[in-house]
Amino acid sequence: MSEQPSIDAVIPLESNPEIFTEFASKLGLSPLLNFTDIYSLDDPDLISFIPRPIQAIILLFPITEKYEQFKDSETVENIDNSQIVWLKQVVKNACGLYALLHSLLNIPRGLIVQSSPVDKFRSEILQNNSDPVKLVQNIAKDMYTSFGEQGQTEAPAAEDNIDLHFVCFVKKGDTIYELDGRRNGPVKLNENSDVNSDLLADDTISKRVKQYISLVDDDNALKFALMGLTPSMD
């Protein structure tokens, strides 16, 4: 039997906690966790409603020329997957999938269902048994399209050029990373964070988001969205 062709482009995901939670559950996320909207990183009252601890944060933001210049000026970390799992994006418009995988592949293994797709994915990456590119393409081929067609807004075509992008923030030990498949590796944001705290315990993420907001004009200022991977309240 001939090998099936790889997927080169997908329908973009909507920044919707229900979609991301359902997708993550299909991949192997524990039912103890789900994605939830984060409406503020500064307002104590709004933050108090967020279930804690937060295992990962996904940011949607507009790509601008200023952002591209900023991105290209930053240094990425040269580390291996035993420290933190990072994936290079090779599937067009799949930044939502890469942000989701970056979240699931870097949270404690006990929060992932054993023998699930993402559990097997992580094992194969850590053991260098499989090509991560093909693993992502297989997930995109098997699951992605149905989730890309969900949501409250009309889904664009897979080949469309989209100016919105997802990245993921995770914490390993005392270090907070930004994981973005459009870069060439992880970005280390803070390596002095309390090992017993979560991603919102200090202002690292807030500063980063404000930095990105400063790179857009007024027309794009409302195109930001945040989701956190938190304990389920069901």
Image: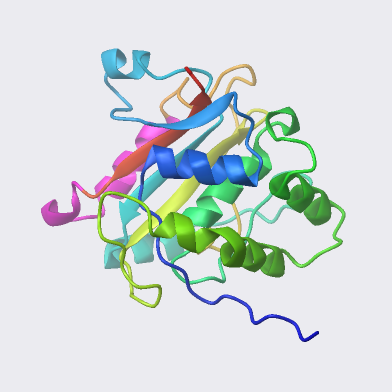
Q: Relative to residue 81, is residue 43 drawn left or right?
A: left
Picture coordinates of residue 116, whole percent (x, y): 73, 44
Residue 218 visible in the picture: yes
91 magenta-colored: no
Q: Is residue 1 left or right of residue 63?
A: right
* Residue in front for this viewpoint, 149 or 20: 149
- How many numbered circles does the render carry? 0
Describe residue 15's horizontal placement relative to residue 147 as left or right.
left
For the N terminus, which image quadrant? bottom right
Magenta highlight range:
204-222
Q: Position of residue 205 (x, y in %)?
A: 42, 34
Q: Residue at x 72, y 35 (%)?
A: 113
- Indicate the quadrant where residue 112 lies: top right
Residue 149 in the image: x percent, y percent? Answer: 38, 59
At horizontal 76% and vertical 67% (from top left) the residue drawn is 131
Residue at x 60%, y 49% (from the top left corner)? 101
Looking at the image, which is closer to me, 144 or 160?
A: 144
Q: Is residue 188 visible?
A: no
Magenta: main secondary structure: helix
